Amino acid sequence: MPFMPDFDDRWADAPDFVLGITKDIWEDRGIDTLLRYYGPDLVVRSPASVIKGNAGIIAATKATLAEFPDRELLGEDVIWCQTGEGSFLSSHRLYCTATHEGAGMYGAPTGRRLAYRILADCWCAANGVHDEWLVRDQGAIVRQMGQQPEDWTRALIAREGGPEHCVKPMTPATDMPGPYRGWGHDNSWGYQLAELLTRIAQAEFSCIPAHYDRAAELAYPGHVDANGHDGADRFWMALHAAFPDATFEIDHVMGMNEPLSPPRAAVRWSMLGKHAGWGMFGTPSGAEVYIIGITHAEFGPRGLRREWTLIDETAIWKQILLATGRV
């Protein structure tokens, strides 16, 4: 019997499905399986772009594999909740390794060996993915190639044909509606993480020492590993200082408590506001910026024990550069 109606017997559960089709598509070169595993009208939203339909997704997949032919996607975790009798929403965390061996959106091949993470939310039903939100650590990729995100993004705009023709980042104006309209599910660990992120966004940075373990292990954009209260404070302070009046929204919340794993949570969130302060993105530009972020966390006896948060720094720089004309 399948674990849910209309899913193949091959899959033992939701994590097995999500990680299994990821391996089928990328590492086993089953790009054609996108026609089976991805809905024909699937919307894939990343900070860099919004793509609808299998044709664009298949083209992007082939381009990525041509540029990174040995790309490996290691599934670190899948946090999920059932959204109906035959559907679920998963948030999975991938640790990716690859060698930049081909030309593509990252420029001429550098031969550099890369390691970075991806966080992705997928709504799945009828043996396929039908809605997706994905955040890739572009800052890590670019830096490991020896460039800075601002400079690389400026060059990307030129490669894409300039400000008028380049691919536009995801914003509320470029987003597309998909079939999943849910907010998550009722779980105390998800609510705890959502409340913590909201309080930090409201400048209550004192909640970090109050609710993070002193030895918390932290992973942030740019493939940055940090530890403890100071590491969390530095990241979140730099981000929110750059957008001091931005509206912070919780877009999706999930939590899990299952055998052999600590309590954990996944929260997708967004920010909309002006780049009006000093912080993560340098001199205030006044540009209106939209940010999509995903955070995973694990909890222990002394508070938040591990955190993984991703935003796409290059998508933010693209909005700043296009708004200011500094291209």
Image (tube, rainbow, N blue to C red):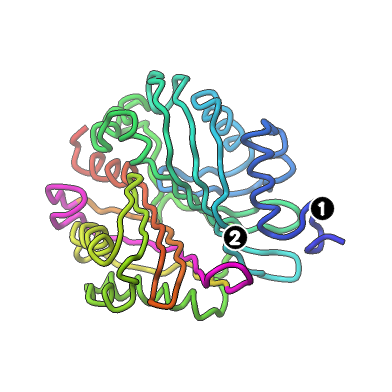
| Quadrant in the picture for residue 320 | top left
For the residue pair 312 and 248, the one nearer the viewer reads as: 312
Q: Classify residue 315 as left or right of residue 246.
A: right
The image position of residue 68, as x and y in percent, is 50, 27
**Vertical placement of 292 versus 67: above or below?**
below
What is the secondary structure assignment of the residue under circle 2?
strand
| Quadrant in the picture for residue 195 | bottom left
The magenta stretch is 257-286
Q: Residue at x 58, y 57 (%)?
A: 178
Q: Amino acid at mark 1?
A: Asp
For disc 2, the marked residue is 90
Q: Amino acid at mark 2?
A: Ser
Q: Name the mark on residue 8.
A: 1
- Dot 2 alpha-carbon crowd within 10 angstroms: few under 14, some 14 to 19, many 20 or more: many
Q: Residue at x 57, y 33 (%)?
A: 61
**Vertical placement of 106 versus 293: above or below?**
above
The image position of residue 221, as x and y in percent, is 34, 49
Q: Residue at x 87, y 61 (%)?
A: 1
The majority secondary structure of the magenta stretch comes to loop
Asked whether the beta carbons under mark 2 and mark 1 sit within 8 Å of each other, the answer is no
* Number of numbered tags placed on the structure image: 2
**Vertical placement of 43 versus 192: above or below?**
above
The image position of residue 100, as x and y in percent, is 44, 25
- Dot 1 alpha-carbon crowd within 10 angstroms: few under 14, some 14 to 19, many 20 or more: some
* Sequence-earlier tag: 2 or 1: 1
The image position of residue 212, as x and y in percent, is 33, 72
Marks 2 and 1, how far apart in space?
17 Å
- In magenta stretch: residue 258: yes
Q: Quadrant of the C terminus?
A: top left
What is the secondary structure assignment of the residue under circle 1?
loop
